[in-house]
Amino acid sequence: MLRTIVIDDEAKSLETITAVLEYYSEDIDVIGTSTNPVAGISIMQDLQPDLVFLDIEMPEMDGFELLNNLPVYNFDVVFLTAHKHYAYQSIKYTPTDYLLKPLDVAKLNETLERVKKRRRKLGNYQQQRRITVATSESFEIIMESDILACSAKANYTSIHLINGENLLVSKPLKEIESMLSPNRFFRVHYSHVVQLCSIRRVLRKDGGIVEMVDGRHFPIAKRRKDALFQRLKLS
């Protein structure tokens, strides 16, 4: 199932698009909708979808600005608009597709097949991205996508998982960090490495703190702040 979010400022349009998606595709699970693009950002960060249908023309913040406000995103984007002239501008965001309203069902099905094919390839890749670590009780095989953050504990490392579990492993943080994908994880502090796409927001207090999607906080070292902000596209 494709975990899907729909963002469109027009309530009637949002309702229609959601109904069409659910009626014509058994592979779509609409897990969230919003007519407010600002609220849409929080929904995307909290629910971590596979696919987002995103209206371009919206008040307060258009679809392009919304994506610019996301530090990192791993979902497929399908832009929705009633106007053809946005097609060229949308290219820089490498969307999976660009659909005109009202939706053409045949074109929609083509788009969904393209998304499913790409997600299958991505899933196969992510399944290969696992690390194996030893705890006092077992050898744990962990998918990278399940790791929220890692924290140094003397010569040990505490691995914080998305599901709230913590694993204490007998390797230093530096060694665990070397096992993780550098494009996905970032050392925000001498003692902490976090998964970038699991950051909900960056707080200004106490010199800078990253808040993760589960509410956990990790401090940002002063010397790491500029590099982190660059990775997150923060000004």
Image: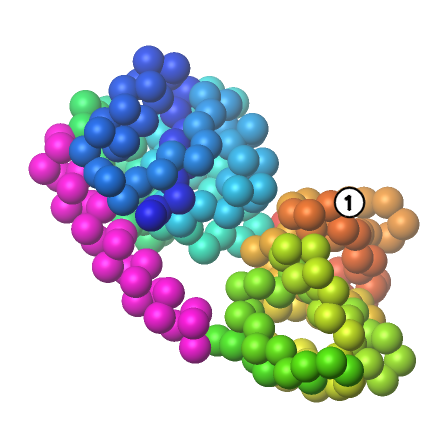
> Circle 1 sits in a helix, a strand or a loop, which is it?
strand
125 within the magenta span: yes
Residue shown at 35% from the left, 30% from the top: 55
* Residue sitting at x 77%, y 82%: 136
Q: Which residue is mark 1?
A: 203
Residue 19 pos. (x, y %): 27, 24
User: Is 95 displayed left or right of 225 in the figure?
Assistant: left
Q: Amino acid at mark 1?
A: Leu
Q: Nearer the viewer, residue 227 or 145?
A: 145
Total marks placed: 1
Stretch in magenta: 104-128
What secondary structure predominates along the stretch shown in magenta?
A: helix
Q: Position of residue 223 (x, y in %)?
A: 80, 67
In front: 46, or 202?
46
Q: What residue appears at the point 54 percent right and 35 percent down from the top-left corner? A: 43
Q: Is residue 125 left or right of residue 107?
A: right
Query: In the picture, residue 133 is in which quadrant?
Result: bottom right
